[in-house]
Amino acid sequence: MLVIGNIPEFRAARAALQGRVGLVPTMGYLHEGHLALVRQAVAENDHVAVSIFVNPTQFGPTEDFNSYPRDPERDLQLLREAGGALVFMPPVSEMYPPGFQTYVEVTGVSQGLEGARRPGHFRGVATVVAKLFNIVQPDRAYFGQKDAQQVAVIQRMVADLAMPLQIVVVPTVRAADGLALSSRNSYLTPEQRQAAPVLYRALMAAKALFDSGNKSPEALRQAMCDVLNSEPLAQVDYVSAADASTLVELDSPTDRPILLSMAVRIGRTRLIDNLVLS
Ligand code: AMP
């Protein structure tokens, strides 16, 4: 496994590869969710590149960039086992050298949900992902359904800017109790960790309502809120029932797929989760 921290060296290693290359962009502190992306990329491509980069431009000024969990040695060991052959692990100065002043801004799908609560977040995501695509030149790039709006933003960017690669979306990997795996779960105390599956239970309650024939978006949002409000440690940031392709909040029933999503604070940790109903 090659581990490379600078762009010219990475380009040289990439140029030597024959066949299809899959890219898995990550911020490290890897878990089984990341490894599901890596394994699928290994199965579908001749070579797999994994980037590990905690991207400062996607964190707001009051967010957790400095405290975001990092363990590069463990990450590299997990990638050796999963078969990630080429690892790109640049320092911030390599991705944002002095004088950097170019950003990618996706409008529309970036604006609601996470984008409304985290101003600038998707501008940072689109910028770093576009730069990673230019460095790695992958045939396919793998993203988790866990970050549903991120997927919509990247798909929009790739279509709008005619980027020559395929985006592959991988289902959310969950713990046995339903909690979506996330690097940020490591912030939770044991008591908070016990409370955290309430997000999944809220999604399941709305799904049960939908499956029983109640397709009212307001009823779906209410069902999620009711479950979340039953957990004293959970503070709802937002719940949403939106059109799954435009991400516009629904006010009446639709035959198109619905994205249920939410952000919830448990203590100081902000967790997100989602489910598509169709
Ligand atoms: P992150 O390191 O949080 O930026 O995540 C890197 C990639 O892994 C993103 O495409 C995420 O959507 C994906 N990912 C994170 N958690 C999960 C999960 N529990 N299941 C599937 N994919 C995930």
Image (cartoon, rainbow, N blue to C red):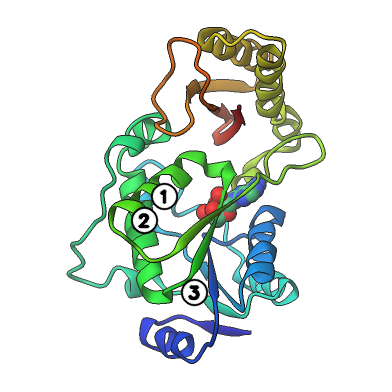
Which residue is located at x 35 percent, y 71 percent? 134
Image side of residue 163 versus residue 73, left or right? left
Image side of residue 131 versus residue 4, left or right? left
Question: Earlier along the polypeptide chain: callout 2 or callout 3?
Answer: 3
Mark 2 neighbour density, 10 Å: few (under 14) some (14–19) many (20 or more): some
Amino acid of disc 3: Met
CA gap, disc 2 and disc 1: 5 Å
**Residue designated by label 2:** 158
Which residue is located at x 31 percent, y 49 percent? 123
**Residue designated by label 1:** 155
176 w.r.t. 135: above or below: above
**Residue designated by label 3:** 89
Q: Quadrant of residue 179?
A: top right
66 w.r.t. 261: above or below: below
90 w.r.t. 210: above or below: below
Check disc 1 and report its element: helix, strand or loop: helix
Check disc 2 and report its element: helix, strand or loop: helix
Image side of residue 151 versus residue 231, left or right? left
Which residue is located at x 24 percent, y 56 percent? 103
